[in-house]
Structure formats: structure tokens, C-alpha cells
Image (cartoon, rainbow, N blue to C red):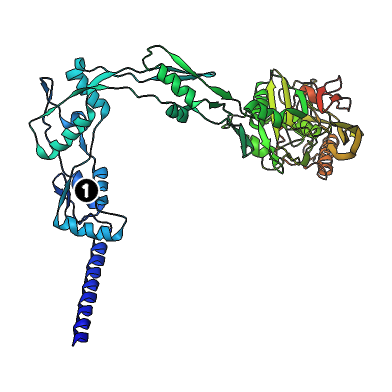
């Protein structure tokens, strides 16, 4: 009998526990993500609602259709809620309501669910307003009763932290104002008393000043992305003795004049100037050529191309592509018309002058002993560098490329001004290296003469449309001397240049009148055929080393320059990787 009673008790207890657990679990599941039943804010029931539903409900309520009258030391005035953008902060209010009763302890949380269910709670709403508009209202109605407080003034200059203490002011108690306005949302009083109180400035402490001003020095840093370098500026560190600073603040508590706390300025280990010098302080190679600044279109192209490659930085393994960095040569991108090579002739085209920049860069790169990936000679002689020292380009077909094989980054600088173009390669020297470049004249091909009929030429007269220039085959060599020893001496490349045909304008030949029935015999234009044949032959021959196409090569030349016979008489002065093109009487001088 006793056993049966005991068993019954156990069953009842276990059942009660199961039921209680089931109810608790059901309660937890029911209010998962919802505000507990019995919770309201400002008289608005939010129980059982999701945060989204509660937000929508509060935003639909107008808690301040009319504000009570404000009274300050006997002065009365009214303010509309719109005047200060006063409204219920629905997001903050809902967050408070949703968090109510959600204890971290699950058993306490279950207890809270049932507690508020049987003992409802009405929470105050959270409000917000525009401080500037509220200040403007107070200034309008009780401005003569207010004296703004002045915050302490602090400035760091050199090794001193200068301080000017703040001063007291008088203003409406914001804490009381907030509480009264919150209560007015539900209690609807006739008036709200505004209390003027003393407003103290921020009390300075040495610890807070240390948190705000003390800092470790910051070294300058760099990052390279898309061949452009960006820097993070260095910054001095600041330190001072907190105990000493606290004593100075205490001694100057009533001081109305400026005083200071001595600080220690800690310099960074690496400034921006030092970083840049450590990376690019050495000139590895430089080259200068000259151009005629009076040729406006060409000058514009040279300057624009120089700007596009200026300050390009290559990390180890990066390959420089001239076409990729200078971009397509279009009017929309700022390029202008100038003389270019096309089909063996000098014609007007877009981008003339581009090749002077690529050729000047090519020589600077040679002196810097960077790895040449792709270089092509012009199909015809050029004026601004010695034959065998040029590098032509044509967007979409011919490119000039080189690679930085060094462990450290290198930077390209390019400047064009006043008829002088200089391109340099900067980096970090690891040895005393000198580079010598020289050329060998292999052979030359005389230019031919073409005649073109032109109606503007009078009988017995001629006019030179294009002056001629001999073609040539030139070998280029390079020697590298490092720490006084010859590291390498080798043949670099062969450059083949077709002659530039001389074109002479002549008057049209008179039509020959033949007796009736007689047919004229067609004779070949021997001179014209030979001239054309030589040009084509040279172009064909050049393709083994120098690709030639109908696409205009983006170099520039004037008809006067083409008149001169190009010979390898240009001399260069070479000193530690620095060279300047020095024109002689036989060069194509611009």
C-alpha cells in the first residue's frame, strides 16, 4: 500500500515537472523574437509583437500632437513638436521593450515571461529631437537667461601641450527637460517647468589627456598597386608623465590664462622622405633627347606620353607595357596630329612623337640594365636617337616591354619641357655598375627618287614633296661593368631601316595625239617600279627583325629631316648610366 502511494506521488511530481517544462518550452517558443505579453510603452501595448510590427505601430502614433506650455522663471512660451523635430525614437523604444525580461539565465527568463504576463509593465518611450533647433528656440525665448559654458581649449605645439581652462555657464537642465517631455507623452500636463542650472565645462584629468594625446610613433609605409605607389605618412609619437601632468592641472585649476604640460616628442624610425630615398634614391639609368617645341601637335603628344609613364613603379617580376600605360592614341584622350611613318612615306597622322618617348625610355632602361622583353626598331630612320637605339610602338600591334628582374622596386620618371625630354629609372644600387652601349654600322641602302604628277606644278618646274634618306642595317651592343669587372659584353639586336624615298612633284605629261587608228605602246615606268620595289624589298627584309605593316608607326619626322642622309655619326657621352643624345651635322636634327 505504501509502495502504491509512493509511486502515485512520483508520477504526480514527474507529470507536474513535464507539464511545467512543456509550458515553459511553449512560452519560450511562443515569444521567440517577440516582445513578451504584458509589456507596453507610453500606454501602447506591444505584447506578442515582432520588432517590425512594434516599430510600425509606434511610428503610426503621434505622442506630441500638442506640447505643454513651457515656463522658465515666470516667462511662458509655447513650442510645436515640429519646431524641434521632437518625436518618439521608435527603434530605440522597441529595442528596450524587446530586451525587457530577457535574462541570460533561461530559468529567470521563463519566470519573467510569466511575471509580466500577470503583472503588466508600461515602459516610458524614448524620444529624440534636433539639438540645434532646440537651442534656437531657447535662445529666442530665454536667451537672456542663458550663458553658454566654454570648454577647455587644448593644443599640441612642439613639445608642449597648451591648455586654457574652460568656464561655467547657465542653461536649461537637459536631463530634467528630457524626463518632463517623456512624461508629457502620457500624462499631458498643462506646463513644463524649465530649470536654469549651472553648466560646468569638462573637467580635465591627466589620464584622459594621456588617452587622447599620447601615441606611439608611426613609420612611413608604402604599397604598390597597378604599378602605382601610395604612401602612408609617418607621424611623431607623443608621451608625457601622467603624475607630473596631474600636478600641473591641479596647480592651475583656477588659472584663467594659458599654461602647458611638457611632452616628449618621439620621432619615427622612418619618415616618408627617408623611405622614398631608401627605395628610389639612386639613379640606375637616365637618357635625354631633344624635340622642337614649336611643333605643337608633336610636343603635346610627347608631353602626354611622358606624363602617362611618369612615376610608374615596378615590383620584382613586373613587366612594363608601353602601350598599356600610355593607352590608345585618340583625340578623345588628348593626342594630336603630327608627322608619322606609313607605307614607307612620311604622312600626317595621330600620335606622332609617341615613339620619341618610348625610344628615350628604352635607352634609360638599357642603362639601368633591366631585362628587355620586347623591342622593335622603326622601319625607317628616325631623328632623335642614333640608329639602333630606337624603339617604335603602334597601339594594338607593336609594343615596347621590359621587366624588373631586381629584388627591389624601380620607379620611372619622365619629364618633357622646353624641347628637352628626360626619362630616368630610379631604385637602389647594390653595386658599382656601369653600362656601355654602342652601335656598329653594317650596311646602307641608298634612297630612290619617285616622280608624282601634280597639276599645280608649271611646265619646266619641279618641287620636292618628300626628301630622301638612306636605309641602313645597324648592330647594337651592350657591356656591363660591375665593381670594375666586365660582367657581360654582348650583341643585343640588329636593326634594319628601309630608305625613305625622295618624292618629286612634276607637271602632268601632255597627252600624246596619235594618228587615227594607231595604238600607243604601254611602257613600264622603270624608275617608279624600281623605287617601289626597293621599298617593298626592304620592308620584307625587315620583318625578320623589324615587323613592318601598313599601320602608321607613331614616330614623327619633318620633310626637312628626311632630306638628310642618316649615318652613324651620333656620339654619346656615357657616365654611370647617364646619356644625352648629342646631335652632329649629319643627324636628323629637330
Q: Residue furthest bottom?
A: 1
Residue shown at 25% from the left, 16% from the top:
147
Q: Nearer the viewer, residue 3 or 587?
A: 3
Q: Residues within 10 Å of mark 1 (few under 14, many from 20)?
A: few
Residue 448 shown left or right of residue 162 in the figure: right
**Where on the picture, by quarter, is residue 221?**
top right
Image coords of residue 32 (percent x, y): 27, 59
Q: Is residue 21 above or below residue 432?
A: below
Q: Position of residue 532 (x, y in %)?
A: 81, 38
**Nearest to the observer: residue 273 or residue 146:** 146
| Residue 375 in sight in this render | no
Q: Residue furthest front?
A: 2
- Quarter of the image containing the C terminus? top right
- Total number of numbered discs in the rendering: 1
Instruction: From the viewer's perspective, tell me whether residue 357 is left or right of residue 150.
Output: right
Whole-percent x and y of residue 58?
Answer: 19, 45
User: Which of 2/148 is in front?
Assistant: 2
Q: Nearer the viewer, residue 528 or 79?
A: 79
**Residue drawn at point x = 61 percent, y = 26 percent:** 267
**Quarter of the rendering occupied by the N terminus:** bottom left
Residue picked out by circle 1: 56
Amino acid at each position: 500500500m505504501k509502495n502504491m502511494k509512493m509511486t502515485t506521488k512520483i508520477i504526480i511530481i514527474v507529470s507536474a515537472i513535464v507539464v511545467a517544462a512543456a509550458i515553459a518550452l511553449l512560452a519560450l517558443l511562443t515569444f521567440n523574437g517577440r516582445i513578451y505579453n504584458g509589456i507596453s510603452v507610453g500606454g501602447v501595448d506591444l505584447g506578442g509583437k515582432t520588432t517590425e510590427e512594434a516599430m510600425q505601430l509606434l511610428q503610426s502614433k503621434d505622442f506630441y500632437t500638442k506640447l505643454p506650455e513651457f515656463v522658465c522663471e515666470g516667462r511662458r512660451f509655447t513650442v510645436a513638436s515640429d519646431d524641434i523635430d521632437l518625436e518618439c525614437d521608435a527603434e530605440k523604444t522597441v529595442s528596450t521593450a524587446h530586451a525587457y525580461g530577457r535574462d541570460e539565465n533561461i530559468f529567470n527568463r521563463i519566470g519573467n515571461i510569466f511575471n509580466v504576463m500577470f503583472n503588466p509593465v508600461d515602459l516610458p518611450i524614448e524620444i529624440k529631437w534636433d539639438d540645434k533647433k532646440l537651442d534656437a528656440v531657447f535662445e529666442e525665448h530665454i536667451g537672456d537667461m542663458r550663458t553658454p559654458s566654454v570648454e577647455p581649449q587644448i593644443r599640441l605645439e612642439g613639445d608642449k601641450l597648451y591648455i586654457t581652462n574652460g568656464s561655467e555657464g547657465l542653461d536649461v537642465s537637459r536631463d530634467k527637460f528630457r524626463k518632463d517631455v517623456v512624461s508629457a507623452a502620457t500624462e499631458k500636463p498643462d506646463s513644463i517647468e524649465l530649470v536654469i542650472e549651472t553648466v560646468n565645462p569638462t573637467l580635465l584629468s591627466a589620464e584622459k589627456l594621456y588617452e587622447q594625446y599620447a601615441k606611439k610613433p608611426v613609420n612611413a609605409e608604402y604599397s604598390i598597386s597597378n604599378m602605382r605607389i601610395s604612401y602612408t605618412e609617418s607621424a611623431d609619437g607623443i608621451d608625457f608623465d601622467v603624475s607630473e601632468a596631474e600636478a600641473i592641472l591641479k596647480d592651475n585649476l583656477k588659472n584663467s590664462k594659458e599654461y602647458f604640460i611638457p611632452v616628449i616628442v618621439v620621432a619615427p624610425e622612418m619618415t616618408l622622405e627617408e623611405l622614398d630615398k631608401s627605395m628610389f634614391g639612386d639613379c640606375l639609368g637616365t637618357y635625354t633627347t631633344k624635340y622642337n617645341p614649336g611643333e605643337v601637335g608633336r610636343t603635346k603628344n610627347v608631353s602626354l606620353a611622358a606624363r602617362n609613364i611618369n612615376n610608374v613603379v615596378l615590383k620584382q617580376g613586373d613587366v612594363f607595357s608601353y602601350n598599356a600605360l600610355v593607352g590608345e592614341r585618340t583625340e578623345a584622350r588628348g593626342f594630336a596630329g603630327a608627322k608619322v611613318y606609313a607605307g614607307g612615306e612620311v604622312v600626317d597622322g595621330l600620335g606622332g612623337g609617341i615613339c620619341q618617348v618610348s625610344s628615350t625610355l628604352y635607352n634609360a632602361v638599357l642603362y639601368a640594365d633591366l631585362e628587355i622583353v620586347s623591342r622593335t626598331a622603326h622601319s625607317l630612320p628616325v631623328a632623335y636617337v642614333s640608329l639602333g637605339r630606337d624603339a617604335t610602338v603602334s597601339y594594338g600591334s607593336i609594343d615596347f616591354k621590359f621587366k624588373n628582374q631586381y629584388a627591389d622596386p624601380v620607379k620611372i620618371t619622365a619629364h618633357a619641357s622646353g624641347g628637352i625630354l628626360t626619362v630616368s629609372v630610379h631604385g637602389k644600387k647594390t653595386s658599382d655598375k656601369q653600362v656601355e652601349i654602342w652601335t656598329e654600322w653594317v650596311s646602307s641602302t641608298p634612297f630612290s627618287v619617285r616622280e608624282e604628277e601634280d597639276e599645280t606644278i608649271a611646265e619646266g618646274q619641279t618641287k620636292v614633296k618628300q626628301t630622301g634618306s638612306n636605309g641602313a642595317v645597324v648592330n647594337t651592343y651592350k657591356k656591363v661593368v660591375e665593381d670594375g669587372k666586365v660582367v657581360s659584353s654582348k650583341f643585343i639586336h640588329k636593326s634594319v631601316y628601309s630608305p625613305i624615298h625622295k618624292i618629286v612633284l612634276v607637271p602632268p605629261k601632255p597627252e600624246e595625239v596619235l594618228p587615227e587608228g594607231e595604238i600607243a605602246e604601254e611602257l613600264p615606268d622603270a624608275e617608279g617600279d624600281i623605287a617601289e620595289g626597293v621599298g617593298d624589298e626592304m620592308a620584307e627584309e625587315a620583318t625578320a627583325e623589324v615587323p613592318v605593316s601598313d599601320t602608321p608607326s607613331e614616330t614623327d619626322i619633318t620633310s626637312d629631316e628626311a632630306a638628310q642622309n642618316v649615318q652613324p655619326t651620333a656620339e654619346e657621352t656615357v657616365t654611370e648610366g647617364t646619356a644625352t643624345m648629342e646631335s652632329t651635322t649629319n643627324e636628323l636634327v629637330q
